[in-house]
Image: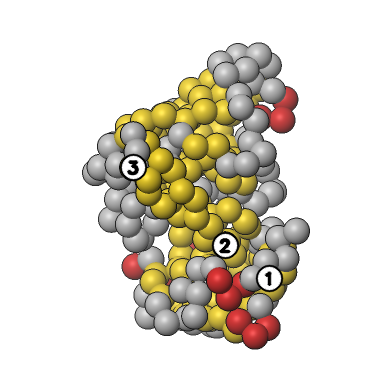
Amino acid sequence: DIQMTQSPSSLSASIGDRVTITCRASQSITNYLNWYQQKPGKAPKFLIYAASDLQSGVPSRFSGSGSGTDFTLTISTLQPEDFATYYCQQSYSNPLTFGGGTKVEIK
Amino acid sequence: EVQLVESGGGLVQPGGSLRLSCAAAGFTFSSYWMNWVRQAPGKGLEWVANIREDGSEKDYVDSVKGRFTISRDNANNSLYLQMDSLRADDTAVYYCARRGGSTSCYAGYCHYYYHMDAWGEGTTVTVSS
């Protein structure tokens, strides 16, 4: 199974900050990497596929990069509605696996 | 509008059974693979199982193999998860999620990428005596 490791597990940031979250795969997944956002008590929301392609309707302040084993999700200018937990997920092979999540909190 | 609505969760004793349902609307259900994903209290997301459009192919995470069965009824736009021999560590919110796909191209090469592009709000399963 492919293990996905996210860091940090949580971070505190202010409105307007640039935020970067890292996701590492235990083996190469080329760019078969998705990102999701989850707010408390809600279902996850799909944000990014193929490591860097934004789902339709996702604000352009979100961006993704990386390939192989190392990936990042960046929020260029943090907005109030961006405080949430973010998960990476590999779609390279079954079993599909998620990272442990990164909680973005208000400083 | 795509809608996925889970039901069937509840409190069950260890060793017991439960059948979850997911009602789909707003898209051609029979054209999509479907997934079950769970989230234990205060924990991250865990993929549980998925099923091909026509039900002919299924896969499971190791921890539920032999205990859980995924199925679907395309005539009624419904997805199911039969859960047997339940354990305390199966306690979680269970989500159904549609497997979407998108094409991405780079340097003249294009590939198809799968993701979970629509989710229900989840149903809670608690396994406890």
For the residue labelled by badge 1, is the local secondary structure a helix, a strand or a loop?
A: strand
- Of B15 and B53, the residue lying toward us: B53
Between the C-alphas of marks 1 and 3, the distance is 34 Å
Q: Can residue A27 be seen in this view?
A: yes
For the residue labelled by badge 3, is the local secondary structure a helix, a strand or a loop?
A: strand
Residue A5 appears at what percent x and percent y?
36, 39
Residue B56 appears at what percent x and percent y?
42, 82
Which amino acid lies under the numbered mark 2 shown in the image of this protein?
Arg
Q: Residue at x 65, y 85 (%)?
A: B75
Between the C-alphas of marks 2 and 3, the distance is 26 Å
Q: Mark 1 sits on what residue?
A: B24
For the residue labelled by badge 2, is the local secondary structure a helix, a strand or a loop?
A: strand
Q: In which quarter of the image is residue B39?
A: bottom right
Residue B88 appears at what percent x and percent y?
50, 67
Instruction: Please report whichever mark, 2 or 1, sits nearer to the chain's N-terminal start.
Output: 1
- Is residue A11 shown above or below B3? above
Which amino acid lies under the numbered mark 3 shown in the image of this protein?
Tyr
Q: Which numbered mark, 2 or 3, is in the foreground of this view?
A: 3
Q: Are marks 2 and 1 on the same chain?
A: yes
- Is residue A44 shown above or below B129? above
CB within 8 Å, label 2 to label 3: no
CB within 8 Å, label 2 to label 1: yes
Q: Mark 3 sits on what residue?
A: B109
Q: For residue B98, which numbered disc appears in the image?
A: 2
Chain letter of disc 3 in the image: B
Chain letter of disc 1 in the image: B
